[in-house]
Image (spheres, rainbow, N blue to C red):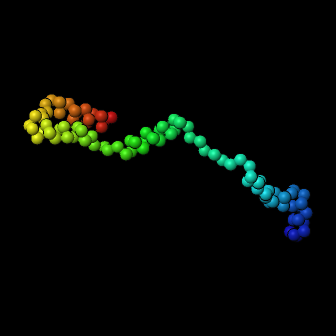
Amino acid sequence: MRIDAYNQIAQIYGVQNSRKTQKAQSTNGPKDQVSISSAGRDYQVAKNAVSEASDIREDKVSQLKSMIDAGTYSVQPGDFASKLLEKYNNSIM
């Protein structure tokens, strides 16, 4: 194939014109902005508060420790067994 024949075909179909890119528009226009709703801000505050909170409830732990030390803490075997079975049943579902 001859190169000059290809150039003529390219001119007919406008192949070279499709390769040209347009110049980017001016960036002086409006800029992108992000606005967070009040519900979103409230959610973020709550999320931060939960992440900073301790997983251990110190008031409960200290109360149970004092009851154990005093010998007043007692667990009923039936209560323990029912909680154990409840946890087991929930884990297999």
- Quarter of the view holding residue 69: top left
Identify whether 93 is placed above or below 27.
above
Camera sees residue 15: no
Nearest to the observer: residue 33 or residue 86:
33
Residue 30 location in percent, x, y? 71, 47
User: In the rendered image, which quarter contains the C terminus?
Assistant: top left
- In the shown orientation, is residue 61 left or right of residue 77? right
Left-right relation of 80 to 14: left
Picture coordinates of residue 27 (x, y %)?
Answer: 73, 53
Which residue occupies 38% across, 41% down? Answer: 50
Question: Does residue 68 appear left or right of residue 53 in this picture?
Answer: left
Q: Residue at left 74%, top 52%?
A: 28
The quadrant holding residue 19 is bottom right
Q: Is residue 7 placed above or below 35 in the rendered structure?
A: below
Residue drawn at 84 percent across, 61 percent down: 16
The residue located at (81%, 60%) in the rendering is: 20
Q: Position of residue 63 (x, y in %)?
A: 19, 37
Can residue 16 be seen from the camera position used here? yes
